[in-house]
Amino acid sequence: MSQQGYVATPPYSQAQLGMGGHPGGFGGPPSQPVYGHYGGPPQPFPIPPGGIHKGPVSAPSAMPQPPASSHYGSSVQQNGSYTQGFPPPPAASSSFGQVPQSPYQNIAPQATPSTHQLTNQISNMQISGYGPMPTPQSPSRSAPQQPFHSAPPHLMAQTPTAPGPQSPSMGSPLPLGGPPPMGGMMPAPMGGPAFHQLQGQGTPQGYPQPPAAGPYGGQLAGPQPGFPGSFPGGAAQMAGPPQKKLDPDSIPSTTQVIEDDQAKRGGQIYATNLRGQIPPLVTSNFTVQDQGNASPRFMRCTTYTFPCTSDLAKQCQVPLGTVIKPFATIPKNETPLYVVNHGETGPIRCNRCKAYMCPFMQFIDGGRRFQCAFCSCINEVPVFYFQHLDHMGRRMDLYERPELSLGSYEFIATLDYCKNNKPPNPPAYIFMIDVSYTNIKSGLVKLLCEELKTLLEKLPREEGVESSAVRVGFVTYNKILHFYNVKSALAQPQMMVVSDVAEMFVPLQDGFLVNYQESRAVIHNLLDQIPDMFADTNESETVFAPIIQAGVEAFKAAECSGKLFIFHSSIPTAEAPGKLKNRDDRKLFNTEKEKTLFQPLKGVYEQLCKDCVAQGCCVDLFLFPSQYLDLATMGDVPTHTGGSVYKYSNFQVERVDGTHFLNDLRKDVEKPIGFDAIMRVRTSTGFRATDFFGAIHMNNTTDVEMAAVDCDNALTVEFKHDDTLNEETGAFIQCALLYTTVGGQRRLRVHNLSLNCSSQLSELYKSCETDTLINFFAKSAYRAMLNQPLKNIREILVNQTAHMLACYRKNCASPSAASQLILPDAMKVFPVYMNSLMKTPAMVGSPEISTDERVLQRLCVMAMGVEETQVLLYPCLIPLQNMDVSSSVLPGAVRCSEERLSDNGMFLLENGRLLFLWLGQACPSELIQSLFNVPSFAHLPEELNSLPELDNPQSKKVHAIISAISERRTNRMKLLIVKQKDRPEILFRQHLVEDKGLHGGASYMDFLCYVHREVRQLLT
């Protein structure tokens, strides 16, 4: 059966230049192959298998769109335009799988589709699933909006098309087209003479038109060379006579997809009893009932139907992967994991492949033997485990045993699973405080010591146990280290100094790691003394590697695993192992050597990673820098030990920073965690796990080692075929995690998932999950940054996007004109996420973004789960000016574009890491009064650092919305209040991902046009 996704048809029946049969596109002949996975072999575009039946084209009747509202500038630059530090633009490929020579430029001489055609193609698109009704306007757009400095948009006249037979499975086709504009207007070809004429008028290279003034003052950023935004085929850069205005509502909307899924599947029970079942989106609220497959909170796949052969997988280029969050938080209304104890015999396993007993195992021979679902080996059932089978061949005790009926559960591990066959000791937490001049002066040390007095009461503990078994220790340091004896028998804490940092050792064993409840009085005494002891310090130099080494040695001596909380201020320049020097060089941005800025220095730090993982020592790093730190090197140990990195630049206690830091620290100390973990992902025959991305360490190709794993750590795994998969049996994945609990018990946590297999590509595309796909691409691109120039990575991302869509078009969609844009229903918003990924700070070499900021984002994304990458790449923009104060529901989000802002509006924007409150200049005075207790916008102070809590419905409602959003996120977000036209607004605008990037990158509209052209090129 043919599958149909989105479609776009121009109203012309003859072949168009640059469309259909004519070679359009741009770029010279390919020079050398690069494609596919970073550094993998090039993939030619394959011919579809014969015999695929193509159905008729179907198109719903089009109806007139509402007039397009005036489109605000795609991205405004305040205080003048920045100078962009980009290299000369790269080249686009003309055949797939080859590195282009200078993509996104070199287009002018080619015959390309007319402006009018592309306008028509995109402007009449109607999102499948919404039906052909006009999109309702968001509240923020009812306000009068300032127009562009350009000709007014023309109303869109459209010819209705006769409805055809609809294909039920992939959404309806989208007509993309209308009649030519009235009045004999001749559309100018994109990149034709008009483009050259503009360049001849002294406009800088790569900018097809002078920047227009933005509606909020400042200039609009022009397209950036080296990015898809700089091709003159973009919707926003049409040379020649005035054109019909593109309606941004007509292209696929992420907020609409999220709303539709919530309306359809939100609030419902999701039972995991079916193989290859597609779960609700991460953004929807649903309750999971485990009935044999792991909850999507633990495992999500890029597609829930794997192709049967490696040839099909290569043909479609959709990566086969799963994102695993083994310790994901389970909501209170869902059942916690059952713990199974088989006593001294330990968990039942397959003799050959060592897979653990799970619902996929098949019992035979009256229940005396079982066949492994992963390797088909026949195993004897131990006598104590025997049970008769019913008439269906199922065990009589099926529902009494979690490992036979549930997708996720835990086993108590036996001594065979413990180091040296000895039960482990409970883990310990060591707090290591940098007491150099900067941290004392900023007030950090005093703030931290005060907080620890209450925070240590909340150390993580086992379910049902009154107090935590986690022991604690304290170290302060600058150029030398101070260890503290806080044994409960002492009246005063004792300090021991180690000044020989080259040969690190721990000067005391008894009294360093203690039970907090027993030593509370001595610890409080110490925390009171530390700020006073170092109050007059002038020491500004610090060490760093010896601190971590000291932690590892302390855990070794105590024979336990644990976590180091390091509070550090500056680049370690003191004479000691791991001394660093400033290697930041912005001249390397956008050059072949840029990758060296992201690479950690080897040597001392590489060895530290191995030592930490071997001992189960996790490192969490809290940084308070005022300048460059070499975060690429300093963040390497946390990244490989399952730890986190937090950064508070130019930290001042009295600002929002103090609260933000304390919120992060509280969450970090209290969150559920397991230590000294080792994980293995097993698969059924025909495919295997080949690649792993995350905050992990690997000594071999199969065992994933993590010094600690917490509720936020996610690991992305890629699978490859090594044989043909069977449609009837499907594909099985088992993730087994061996770890030590906070109470010191060794356990095995097992998650199982079954997927469908198909020889029809349409089935694969139907069960894709965009949010998981983009997590996979983000991590693989961010890892590739260590070895490849960003220009190559961006090309590969665009190429693979085009390839996936071209393959769908060629093999799954009904035949249609080449000029139609067709997107699979499950991937219709994939382009907006991909474009956003290419505009993230890590992927953009702009002098305005510091190297450490880019490195931080790279490190954080590598450990993120699907929910975190989804909101990072498509932030949530919520209008507040018309909120219903009596409702408990969050106001609906609007599209993440400047066009949605209005002068009289107030908006919240959050991306999981930052939270902005944006205030329009004409924001109603009563709303300003209710929230800030000042009469109007003009009375707001220059620097707004916090939102006061006032006793009125509006203030309570906004605070309730902020806390509801914060509860959902893994990080505690810092609230930044931004006023329209103030300088800080630039930071806010970087997150409006549907617009042009402030530091380079195309708008969503331009990127869609560009990808469409690449797809057409592949198909011709």
Image (cartoon, rainbow, N blue to C red):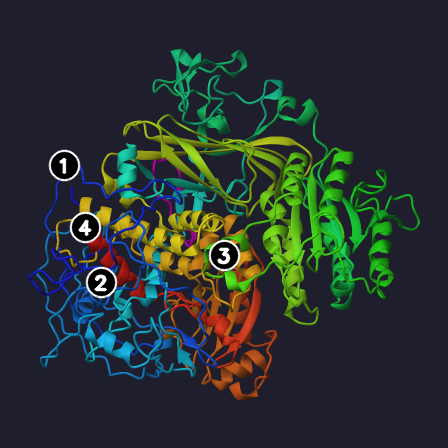
User: Do labels 4 and 1 touch, CB within 8 Å?
Assistant: no
Which of label 4 and label 3 is nearer to you?
3
The residue carrying mark 1 is 50
Magenta stretch?
A: 271-285
Query: Closest to the observer: 142 or 848?
Result: 848
Quadrant of the frame with the N terminus: top left
Q: Which residue is mark 3?
A: 594
Q: Position of residue 964 (x, y in %)?
A: 52, 61
Kindly report the distance in space between the C-alpha atoms of the residues bearing marks 3 and 2: 42 Å
Residue at label 4?
A: 1019
Q: What amino acid is at disc 1?
A: Gly
Q: Is residue 147 above or below residue 710?
A: below
- Alpha-carbon span between mark 4 and mark 1: 16 Å
Main SS category, magenta section: loop
Label 3: element kind: helix
Q: Which-is-in-front pick, marks 4 and 1?
A: 4
Q: Residue furthest right?
A: 491
Query: Disc 4 and disc 2: Cα gap in Å?
Result: 23 Å
* CA distance separating discs 4 and 3: 35 Å
Q: Is residue 331 left or right of residue 1004?
A: right
Residue topped by disc 2:
126
- The amino acid marked with disc number 2 is Gln
Judge whether residue 788 can be spotted in this image.
yes
